[in-house]
Image: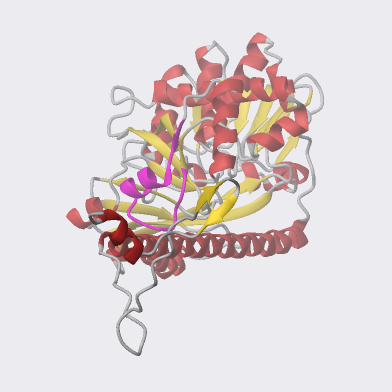
């Protein structure tokens, strides 16, 4: 999913002399357009492998979504795993999933306190369901653990609600190997590592045009020209004139996030889970930062707006999910735009000889941008062909303005459907609970009734019970005849003296 992070980019420590505007012509092996997560990873890995690399950034490092993300790192893609298998088959899906795990491992190896001080890594991620989907959960757990060798745990409703004190979530899937970092510090730390490896980063240097023909490609900027054997387009939706056709294959999506003021002990009373939490419908995404502050992302939209406008919406959402917190004070609001592809997978690979793309990371997560950068650098310098696994996901026009309107309407419909399904699930849960209470009360009433002595039936009206006459004694048989039983008088005579 698309993610969002803390605060505005911190330019301190950026080593400004090495990030000035490009003002002289250059010849390099690889030119990377865009100093976001994917572009900086390409630059770092290619420089480590011995290539000369120049990174051109129209504004500054991490100015957009790459520097404003929640920092959750876990395997997988934006396309649901079942749809991925259906699209390309189980074996290729497993290969792609393995690449996504390599990307997560890459970030973990780079995001250490030694390499990036203050990165604030915390472990674990939890995906929760808005509806009671126990059978679906079991099926997905089996697929992840058995077919894709991913460490996961299934959490029952009671455990989810023990960690998150809300009745809005049901089952959950816990990823113990997932983690989260300070996204802003990661992108700037990655730039520092790229420079350390030998890459040169030029800010305030937009690309005016690209000529990808010939062995040596030509890149024109406002103040200089470059020649390179390979060009990597990692500018997402902001490529603009450099590659209008490519940027039009992405639907621009904005997501804004807020950071609360410190909430003290009351936050720990409501949320004890220290990792990141996402819901299965892509509506809520939040985590605790700095011990007692809550970072919360808003739903997506396809139009740009000032982040401050979404502060009250996030406040309402927090109060809806966790009413115990009430209306919290927001300390900061921020956001960025990402590019979302029509097919739901990132764009990774070679467009033509020497022209590469690493884009479309909206709803994908940090792991995919890291994986793409590493994969493209190895493809260029080592001949790694695994980028062809992404070939089934071709460039598809995103629909322009019509696509943005449709995307917004689809998003609103999806959120409305999810809200309705969640409300229905909670109603059914409440109805079951009420029925259980009623049955328990009825059983208790029956039990208490069974311990009392049965009530005595009153005699019929008209006096005491009538005495039934004693039945006559059985008759004796003599020689086949029947003799009447002797009367009481005759018995006395016979028993008396003769």
Residue at 52 percent across and 31 percent down: it is: 367
The C terminus lies in quadrant: bottom left
Tell me the quarter of the picture where residue 411 sits.
Answer: bottom right
Residue at 22 percent across and 58 percent down: it is: 263
Residue closer to the observer: 190 or 1: 1
Tell me the quarter of the picture where residue 32 sits.
Answer: top right
Q: Is residue 326 left or right of residue 363?
A: left
The N terminus lies in quadrant: top right
Residue closer to the observer: 243 or 107: 107
Residue 315, image x and y in percent? 38, 66
| Residue 27 seen in the figure | no
Q: Which residues are magenta?
A: 153-171
Q: Is residue 168 left or right of residue 219?
A: left
Q: How is the image coloured?
A: secondary structure
Residue 344, placed above or below residue 476: above
Residue 94, image x and y in percent? 65, 22
Residue 165 counted in the magenta span: yes
Residue at 33 percent across and 64 percent down: it is: 488
């Amino acid at each position: 999913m698309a993610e969002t992070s803390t605060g505005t980019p911190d330019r301190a420590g950026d080593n400004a002399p090495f990030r000035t505007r490009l003002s002289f012509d250059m010849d390099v092996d690889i030119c990377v357009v865009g100093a976001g997560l994917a572009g900086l990873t390409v630059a770092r890995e290619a420089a480590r492998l011995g290539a000369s690399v120049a990174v051109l950034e129209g504004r500054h490092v991490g100015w957009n979504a790459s520097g404003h993300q929640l920092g959750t790192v876990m395997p997988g893609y934006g396309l649901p795993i079942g749809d991925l298998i259906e699209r390309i088959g189980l074996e290729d899906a497993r290969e792609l999933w393995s690449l996504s795990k390599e990307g997560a491992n890459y970030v973990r190896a780079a995001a250490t306190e030694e390499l990036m001080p203050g990165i604030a890594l915390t472990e674990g991620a939890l995906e929760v369901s808005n509806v009671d989907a126990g059978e679906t959960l079991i099926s997905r757990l089996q697929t992840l653990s058995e077919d894709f060798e991913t460490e996961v745990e299934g959490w029952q409703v009671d455990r989810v609600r023990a960690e998150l004190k809300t009745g809005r979530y049901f089952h959950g899937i816990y990823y113990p190997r997932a983690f989260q970092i300070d996204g802003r510090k990661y992108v700037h730390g990655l730039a520092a590592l790229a420079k350390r490896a030998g890459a040169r980063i030029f800010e305030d240097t937009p690309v005016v045009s690209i000529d990808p023909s010939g062995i040596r490609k030509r890149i024109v900027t406002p103040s200089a020209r470059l020649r390179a054997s390979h060009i990597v387009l990692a500018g997402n939706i902001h490529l603009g004139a450099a590659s209008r056709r490519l940027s039009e294959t992405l639907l621009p999506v904005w997501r804004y996030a807020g950071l609360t003021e410190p909430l003290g002990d009351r936050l720990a009373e409501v949320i004890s889970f220290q990792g990141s939490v996402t819901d299965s419908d892509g509506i809520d995404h939040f985590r605790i930062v700095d011990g007692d502050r809550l970072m919360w992302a808003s739903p997506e939209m396809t139009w740009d707006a000032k982040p401050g406008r979404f502060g009250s919406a996030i406040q309402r959402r927090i109060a809806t999910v966790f009413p115990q917190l009430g209306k919290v004070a927001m300390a900061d609001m921020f956001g960025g735009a990402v590019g979302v592809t029509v097919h739901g997978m990132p764009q990774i690979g070679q467009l033509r000889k020497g022209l590469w793309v690493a884009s479309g990371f909206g709803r994908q997560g940090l792991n995919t941008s890291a994986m793409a950068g590493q994969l493209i650098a190895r493809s260029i310098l080592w001949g790694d062909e695994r980028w062809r696994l992404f070939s089934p996901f071709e460039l598809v026009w995103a629909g322009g303005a019509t696509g943005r309107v449709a995307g917004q309407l689809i998003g609103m419909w999806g959120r409305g459907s999810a809200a309705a399904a969640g409300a229905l699930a909670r109603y059914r849960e409440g109805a079951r609970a009420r029925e259980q209470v009623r049955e328990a009360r009825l059983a208790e009433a029956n039990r208490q009734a069974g311990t009392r002595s049965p009530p005595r039936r009153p005699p019929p009206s008209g006096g005491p019970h009538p005495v039934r006459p004693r039945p006559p004694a059985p008759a004796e048989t003599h020689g086949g005849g029947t003799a009447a039983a002797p009367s009481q008088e005759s018995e006395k005579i016979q028993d008396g003296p003769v």
